Image (spheres, helix red, strand yellow):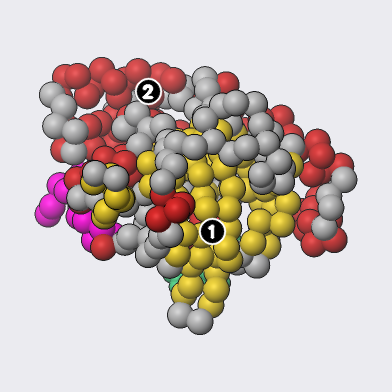
Amino acid sequence: MMPAGKFLWMNESLINGALARPLESSMLEAPGYAAQEGEMPGLVSDGRPDMIRVVGLNKFFGDLHVIRDVSFSVRKGEVVVLIGPSGSGKSTLLRCINRLEKADSGVIYIDGIPLGMRKKGDRWVPASEAAINKLRSEIGMVFQRFNLFPHLTALQNVTEALITVKKMAPASARSIGMELLARVGLSDKVSSYPCQLSGGQQQRVAIARALAMKPKIMLFDEPTSALDPELVGEVLAVMKDLAESGMTMLVVTHEMGFAREVADRVMFMDSGQILEDAPPEVLFRSPKHARTRSFLQRIAHS
Ligand SMILES: Nc1ncnc2c1ncn2[C@@H]1O[C@H](COP(=O)(O)OP(=O)(O)O)[C@@H](O)[C@H]1O
Ligand SMILES: [Mg+2]
């Protein structure tokens, strides 16, 4: 059997054809350029650089137009919660940012660099596979299903990519792994296999595993929705701690308490578009769109 890390990396190669077909060169002339105040509704302009900047993103599945000309930014250190009905395109948007999906048009800048491109002289050209993989490794992703390797311990799950991808010495990887498992409150579970851990513990291992790659950005796709209710809090607590440490986070969740308490902004997505983008107290108290209102009512009563 192939080592788990190899397998992961193969997937990365597979998606490598994925280059956001693009690209008006005018869009690309100013990577690292930060949104001007008033340029995008809902953005708080406080001078922080954009860590994620999405411009005019479109994604089709066959005839289905799943992401419709979506533009937004997430500043460095900002926590943005993305809400919206099932099927509205939230996962697809995250997957485009992480390049698990190929966007059909538009540009995604990660920390000022257009995803999939590199500068050659004064032109942007498709980046090499290695450069794309490096950029992708700066984006951690945590899924609804924890996707841990069942045959590896908690510690091995966290250190696997460090050893196989980053070629780190096992002893160094181990010390990083121990530190990260301590950070998510699992020092006593380093030798446990996923089947010996609760869902909440598995999800915390998955977060530690993502953090091991030292991402600049963490994407969460409904990280608590597969958990028993009593286990949700421990995962949200880890995420809150991460937010307080200054991590840039884009989080799809229906945990409105978390959004209220931790998010700088909440974006409401419907039918492939971001209809609203506002601080939680504004969006929850006085949503502008009827569709946002009815979604929030449905969530509150479910
Ligand atoms: N790989 C795929 N192939 C075809 N259609 C897809 C694929 N992934 C998602 N979709 C469709 O795209 C739309 C958005 O899905 P998704 O991004 O998963 O929404 P959400 O995460 O908001 O529930 C849905 O209509 C879904 O059925
Ligand atoms: Mg989804």
Is 228 above or below relative to 177?
below
The percent position of residue 24, horizontal first and vertical second, equals: 43, 59
Q: Is residue 43 magenta?
A: no
Q: Which residue is mark 1?
A: 56
Q: Is residue 122 left or right of residue 224?
A: left
Which quadrant holds residue 255? top right
Crowdedness near tag 2: few (<14), some (14–19) or many (≥20) residues, C-alpha within 10 Å: many
Q: Secondary structure at mark 1?
A: strand
Q: Amino acid at mark 2?
A: Leu
Q: Residue at x 43, y 67 (%)?
A: 104
The percent position of residue 88, horizontal first and vertical second, equals: 62, 64
Q: Which residue is mark 2?
A: 180
Which quadrant holds residue 239? top right
Q: Residue at x 51, y 50 (%)?
A: 54
Q: Residue at x 33, y 60 (%)?
A: 19
Q: Main secondary structure of the magenta part?
A: helix
Is 209 above or below relative to 114?
above
